[in-house]
Image (cartoon, rainbow, N blue to C red):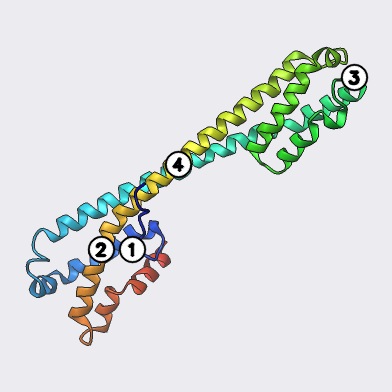
Amino acid sequence: MPDRVVPLFNCRAEEVAPLARLLRAHYQEDAADFVELLPEEYGKHFLTDYDARLQAAEAADSQRSAAGRSQQLGQQVLATMEQLPLRLNRLEARLRRAEGLTVPLKAFGLKPVRDAREANDPERLELALKTLLQNLDANAAALQAKGHKAEETEQLRALRQELAAGSTAQDVAQTRQQGVTQEATQVLNELFRLMQELMADGKSLYRGVDKAKVKNYTLTQLLKRVRREA
C-alpha cells in the first residue's frame, strides 16, 4: 500500500491556489530583481512551470470538491428513513391484535428498527429491518387477517434494499474521495514547493532592504490577505 501523502502546507488545501495566484502577482512586479538574482531559475521558463502547477492544483481542487459532493448520497438514505415512523405505527397496531404470532410483539423487531432510525444509523437500520422482515414473512397470514397488505411488507423490503444500496454507494464514494484527496495533495505539494522557493528568494532579495516587499513573500501575510478577501 503506498505511503500516505503528507501536505507540505499548513493552510487549508483550498487556500493553496489563491495563495499561489497572489504570490504570482507579486513576483510579476519584481520579476527583474529575481532574474538578476538567479537568472537560470527565473528565466523565461519559470512562469510557464509555475502556471502549469497552478492549473493542475486548481483542477485537483475541483476533483476534490466533486468527490466531497458525492458524500451527499448519504442524504438520500436519511430521507428514506423518514418514511418509517408511520409505517411502524400502523404495523404495531395490527401486531397487537394479531393472533397466533410466531414471536411475541416485544421480540418482533419494531424497537430495534425505531432505535436505529432515531440514531440516524443506516447500517444498523438495514440489519434491524432484516429481522423485522423475516418475522413479517413468517407471520404474513396472521397480519393479513388484521389488514396488513403484502405491498406494505414489500415497501419495507424495498426500503431495506435502498438502505443497503445507499450504504454501499456511500462507501464507494468515501473510498474514491480518499484517493482523490491523496492525488490532490500531491499536486498541491508540487505547487507549494515552488512557492516556498519563490518566497525564500523574495526574502533574500528584500530582507533589511524593503519591509513592504518582504511581506509580499511571507506566507503568514499572504494568508491573511487571502482569508480577508475570501
Q: Residues within 10 Å of mark 3 (few under 14, many from 20)?
A: some
Kind of residue at badge 3: Ala
Q: Is residue 161 left or right of residue 181?
A: right
Camera-side residue: 124 or 228?
124
Q: Circle 2 is placed at which residue position? A: 193
Camera-side residue: 227 or 77?
77
Q: Count of labels shown?
A: 4
Question: Do the residues under discs 2 and 1 have CB atoms within 8 angstroms?
Answer: yes
Residue 159 % position (x, y): 66, 26
Q: Mark 1: which secondary structure? A: loop
Vertical order, 180 against 201 (above or below): above
Question: Do the residues under discs 4 and 2 have CB atoms within 8 angstroms?
Answer: no
Question: Do the residues under discs 2 and 3 have CB atoms within 8 angstroms?
Answer: no
Label for residue 165? none
Label for residue 175? 4
Task: Of the two numbered discs 1 and 4 on the same chain, state the one appearing first in sequence.
Answer: 1
Label for residue 8? 1
Kind of residue at badge 1: Leu
- Marks 2, 3: nearer the viewer: 3
Residue 179 % position (x, y): 39, 44
Task: Of the two numbered discs 2 and 3 on the same chain, state the one appearing first in sequence.
Answer: 3
Q: Is residue 142 left or right of residue 200?
A: right
Q: Is residue 91 left or right of residue 39?
A: right
Residue at horizontal 42%, vertical 40%? Answer: 176
Task: Of the two numbered discs 2 and 1 on the same chain, state the one appearing first in sequence.
Answer: 1
